[in-house]
Structure formats: C-alpha cells, structure tokens
Image (spheres, helix red, strand yellow):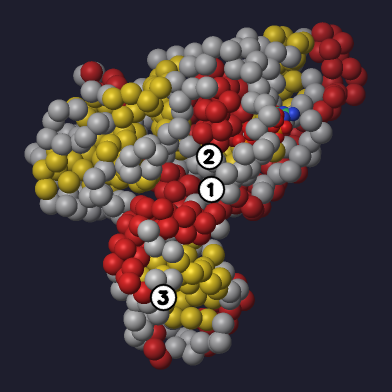
Amino acid sequence: MSDLQREIQRRRTFAIISHPDAGKTTLTEKLLLYGGAIQLAGSVKGKAAARHAVSDWMELEKQRGISITSSVLQFEYDGYCINILDTPGHQDFSEDTYRTLMAADSAVMVIDAAKGIEPQTRKLFKVCAMRHIPIFTFINKLDREARSPYDLMEELEKEFGIGTYPMNWPIGCGVDFKGVYDREKNEVLAYTQFHAGSKAIHATELSLEDETELRDMLGERLYSTLRDDVELLDGAGYEFDRELVQSGDLSPVFFGSALMNFGVEQFLQSFLALTTPPMPRLSEGTPVDTEEPFSAFVFKIQANMNKAHRDRIAFMRICSGRFERNEEYFHVQGDKPIRLAQPQQMMAEERQIIDEAYAGDIIGVFDPGIYSIGDTICSKDRRVCYEGIPTFAPEHFAAFERKDTMKRKQFETGIRQIAQEGAIQIFHEPNTGLEEVIVGVVGVLQFDVLEYRLQNEYSTAVRRRGLPYENIRWIVSDTDPSSLQLTRDTKWVQDFKGNDLLLFGGEWNIAYTLKQNPGLELAEFSRN
Ligand code: G4P
C-alpha cells in the first residue's frame, strides 16, 4: 500500500446530527477525549445564557478556553484519523447545516432516550437519506428516565423508513440503569462507578452465562427482563447486514450515556470498524477514485471568522489525492489556476496552517470572494467537476428593500454576496423591478444576521416585511408558470438563476395546486 493509500484508508469523516439538547456537544467532547485531544473533559457546564446565539463549538470554545471555532475537528484514535463536522443545531440552524452533510461520509444521529425523534433530527435525517450515507444512532441519556427501547426503535423504523439493528441493549434506565448488553460480544457492560469526566470507565464485563453474578448485580427483575430481551432480539428483527448499513438502509443503534461516558468508547470502536474510508465521488456522472490527483469541492463559506478583518473562509472537502500547500491548482468554475491561500485545518485544539491534507479531510482557505458553494478545485493535470450541492428549501420568507434609494448598488452587492455564501436564498417576482428582494432562509436567525450585515458591512439600512409563506417548490416540469391556476396565497417567483418556483402558504396548498394543474411537477431541492 502506498503512503497515499494508507493515509486515505485510515480517514473517517462524519457529522453528528441531533435536535438541540439531545447531547451532541457532550458526545463530541467525549469522542475528543478518546482521541487524547482534551485531557480532562469536565462536563459542559453553565452554558445556559448565551447558548442559543452561537454554535455549539463556539460555546465549547468559550468554556474550555480553547480555539475550536471551526467547521471541523480532526483527531487521531487507534490508528484512524477522524474528522468530525459541526452541524449547528440551535437557532443558527441554517442551510450550512444541511450542506455540511454533503461533506460527510456518514452521520451519527444522537437521540434523547426520553424524547425520541424530534423536529431537527427529522430534517437532518432527510438530507442523510437523500445521500444514502450510513447513519449510526446513539440513543443518549439512559442514566435518566427513558422510553422503552422497543418503542424508540419502532419509531425510528416507522418515521424514517429504515431498518434498525441494536448493537447493544440497555439494562434499566434512570436510577435503575445498570449498563448495556453488548450483543456481538455477548457481554454485559455494567457500571460499578461513574466517572463522567475521565477517560477510564469503571465497568465490569460479564458474559450472559455468568448467571449468578448477573443475578446479584442486576437483581432478579432486571436479570429476567434482560434474558427475555436478548431472546426476543435474537429471534426477531433484522439481520445485521453490512451492505445495508453502508447504503444507509440499516442503522446500527447504540444505547448509552454521553454525560456519564458510558458506552461511548464501544460506540466509537464499532462505528470506526463499520464505516468506510472516503469513497469515490461523482464528477459529471463518473466516479473519481480517491487516489487520483488532488480534487475538492467547496461546501461552506463563512464570512467574518475574524472580526478584525472582513475575511471569508471557504471550506472544502478533499475528495481525492493529497493537497500540498505550495502547489498550483485549478479552480474549475473560475476557469483559473489558483494557489490556496493560508490553508487551515483544525487539529482538535488549535487551528493551524497546514502543509498537506488527504482525501476525507476538510481544509479552510482564505476566500477573496471568488468561490461559491459547490465549486470544484482540482489538480491542473486532472480536471474534474463535482456535482453541485443541492439548494435546500427555505422555510421562512421576508421581503427586503433598502431604506435609502441611493444605496442601490450596495444593497444589491451585499445581498448577492451574502447569498453567495449560502446563508440566504434570494428570489424576485418575475416581471417586476428588483426594488424588493424576497429572501428565504432555513433558520429565522438568518434574517437578523442579514439585516445586521447589510447595515454593518455594506452601510445599507433595510426594511423587512415578513411574508406568510412556509413552503417552496421548484417547478421541474415544462409548465409555463404564467398559465398556472394558483390560489391567492401561492406566489410564483424566480431565483437569480432564472429557475421558476412557487411559494405556498402551507402544505395543503401544494397538494391543491398539483391537483388543479395536471402535468405540474414540483421538487423540494434544486439541483443547480
Ligand atoms: P446538544 O449539543 O445536542 O445541544 O446537547 P448538549 O451536549 O449541550 O447537552 C444538552 C444537555 O443534556 C446538557 O445539560 C448536558 O449536560 C445534558 N446531557 C448530555 N448527555 C447526557 C447524558 O447522557 N445524560 C444526562 N443525564 N444528561 C446529558 P444542561 O443542563 O442543558 O447543560 P449544562 O448546564 O449541564 O451544560
């Protein structure tokens, strides 16, 4: 195996997705701990006040006094090189969150055992399912009162239409939580002592055959429940099938407690063994092998990472080969050779300028305003062009116009550049002037961010008018939009690439419009 192959084979790049408060930050922190990235992780405390305004990792950064404001954390564990991608789950939930999933090879879905599937888990899952990436489920907070594990599994299967396979099984919950049964090893991992902050867990491993010890440890009731559960699980349910896991059709499920650091390392080990290294991506319909010369695509652009300078960082996911700092590459959409300025990577505790990186890694480069989401950067010798990143349907809409009529240029430039970063989407009514721009966002906080940035960065005060639409669909059939029969709360708009779309006041309206207009086809994502 060449050095290049070896480096790529040991990479695992994934995102952790969850509804706020399910435990994503806590789990991330514990995973970092196993990588030796943080020596002594205390539980993440006292973040109540400002938590909703900033991303989880900025929050972590404040509390731990380390710089981890970034889109990705990299650490080493057991010979693997692991990249965890941040998917903000709070009010800063935005298009970015979705796009980050485009750069991941698999996803870990954290679910609160008392709550089950929640709205944001649902949204994020949809994107993972669209990409058919493997999805691992970590059912968290077993140290608290929890719903029945059978219920939780059934909910996952019913709502998401996937198979589930419990890798371990909880024994009790809340004050009665005694540990988990590892199905593969046929072993009970029982807690004898909780050490939430330290790496070592004090657990006893007992085989199911150690009947006397188990009865003593679990008590008669939990012991017999466990025996029944194991019998039931072995007798019914899904067979474990690695291929189904890899196509995203079967989710391995783990029960544990991130806060108590219980089941986390077992989860990490299984996860690493079951996920694949980076796989070939499609360039114009043809897979590009990961060992081909360097190629990458931009999945996120973040402005103002450093408040002192008005800088933009473009984050790119490397799809093939090795990136070298001083090499000249090619920016496909710009049709220009390019050197990537100040390539940075997060190495768990610090952001640093890097000299090289491999397929699977994420690098952030300084963006003088030339990149757009979805752009491809590749070796000069091997031109590729990755498929664009879909545009996700915004869910909130408002009309923006400038207060000062003299500021037309600033307003248009500002709104266009911010849209280019992908935090907002912009539309306009066909056949009208561009005085008013319709802005669509995935998370409402983006409206405030837009207003603030137009004022601060482009010196343009704006007026905002909320619009009563909730759903948007791209027209994908050959229909003439001006001939459509639409209700009063449905509006025809165009995006700035000239695509026709419809805005709807509610879900029922979509069905109604489709019924009224035979032949009309609508799509939830735009592919270009
Ligand atoms: P998030 O990133 O998904 O939003 O969740 P986060 O990790 O911030 O966890 C949300 C809350 O749930 C935190 O408590 C955290 O301590 C708690 N938590 C996470 N995992 C577990 C677990 O396995 N068991 C229990 N019992 N609690 C868990 P908080 O009180 O909201 O915050 P804090 O003040 O403790 O930081």
- Between disc 1 and disc 2, whose residue precedes? 2
The percent position of residue 168, horizontal first and vertical second, equals: 66, 27
Q: Is residue 498 left or right of residue 485?
A: left
* Discs 1, 2 touching: Cβ within 8 Å: yes
Residue 444 visible (yes or no)? yes
Q: Which residue is mark 3?
A: 436
Residue 267 visible (yes or no)? no
Q: Which residue is mark 1?
A: 92
Give residue 185's quadrant in the image: top right
Residue in the foreground of this view, choosing between 509 and 433: 433
The percent position of residue 148, horizontal first and vertical second, equals: 79, 38
Q: Is mark 2 within 8 Å of ligand 1?
A: no
Question: How far apart are labels 3 and 2 at the CA level?
Answer: 31 Å
Question: How far apart are labels 3 and 1 at the CA level?
Answer: 25 Å
Residue in the foreground of this view, choosing between 230 and 164: 164
| Three-letter amino acid code at the position of disc 3 | Glu
Query: Could you say whether the residue bearing mark 2 is in a helix, strand or loop?
Result: loop
The percent position of residue 366, horizontal first and vertical second, equals: 27, 38
- Between disc 3 and disc 2, whose residue precedes? 2
Q: Is residue 248 left or right of residue 267?
A: left
Classify the position of ligand 1 by quadrant: top left, top right, bottom left or bottom right: top right
| Three-letter amino acid code at the position of disc 1 | Asp
Q: Is residue 187 left or right of residue 346?
A: right
Q: Is residue 314 left or right of residue 233?
A: left
Residue in the foreground of this view, choosing between 374 and 70: 70
Q: Is mark 1 within 8 Å of ligand 1?
A: no
Q: Which residue is mark 2?
A: 55
